[in-house]
Amino acid sequence: MILSDRDIRGLLAIGDLVVNPLSGDTVRENGLDLRLGRGYCRFRSTGRVLDPRAPGEASDFYECSEADEIIVGPGEHMLLHTLEYIRLPSYVAGLVNLRSTWARTGIYIPATVVDAGFEGQLTIEVIGSGFPVKLYPGDRFLHLVLVKLQSPAENPYKGRYQGQRGVRLPKLFAENTG
């Protein structure tokens, strides 16, 4: 069952769902609008092979920084993060969608699921359009549809990305697995 704005406000009121910061326009008809954070990582163009068993240094494959403006180049792959830190209860999962305004610019994000019990800022892969698009931290960027599970997860999420802040690179890289 997809949660309505009324359901979401109820979960926020009892503390089962946490969204910080929570703005007046965060709760929508059937989900949450999440804002873009300042951090980003660009995928580096390299001839090196990323071997998951011996990945090397993250800086060989990613260039990470923070900015007040982020330009996503044509066809470019980047990792971005949400401004909001969220905590889902064990009986709610999330489906991440790009807000339609941004989808209409040609930007794309792969299908992303937020597991029941997840806590942290979301790291999202973004794929550029046919032309450069400028993004501004603080703008509403993602829509998180919240789905109530038929029963609470027996094993809610407790993985390596739990509690993440900023862009979190793949857990393959030792310096990034906290």
Image: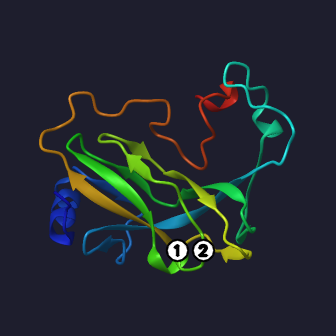
Residue depicted at 68% across the width and 19% down the height: 53
* Marking on residue 13: none
175 up-or-down from 53: above or below: below
In which quadrant of the rendered image does the C terminus lie?
A: top right
Q: Is residue 84 left or right of residue 3?
A: right
- The three-letter code of the residue at mark 1 reads Ala
**Label 1: how many Cα within 10 Å (few below 14, some 14–19, many 20+):** some
Whole-percent x and y of residue 19? 36, 58
Q: Quadrant of residue 159?
A: top left
Which residue is identified by label 2? 106
Whole-percent x and y of residue 84? 46, 59
* Marking on residue 103: 1
Q: Secondary structure at mark 1?
A: helix
Instruction: Indicate the colouring scheme.
Output: rainbow
- The three-letter code of the residue at mark 2 reads Gly
The count of marks equals 2
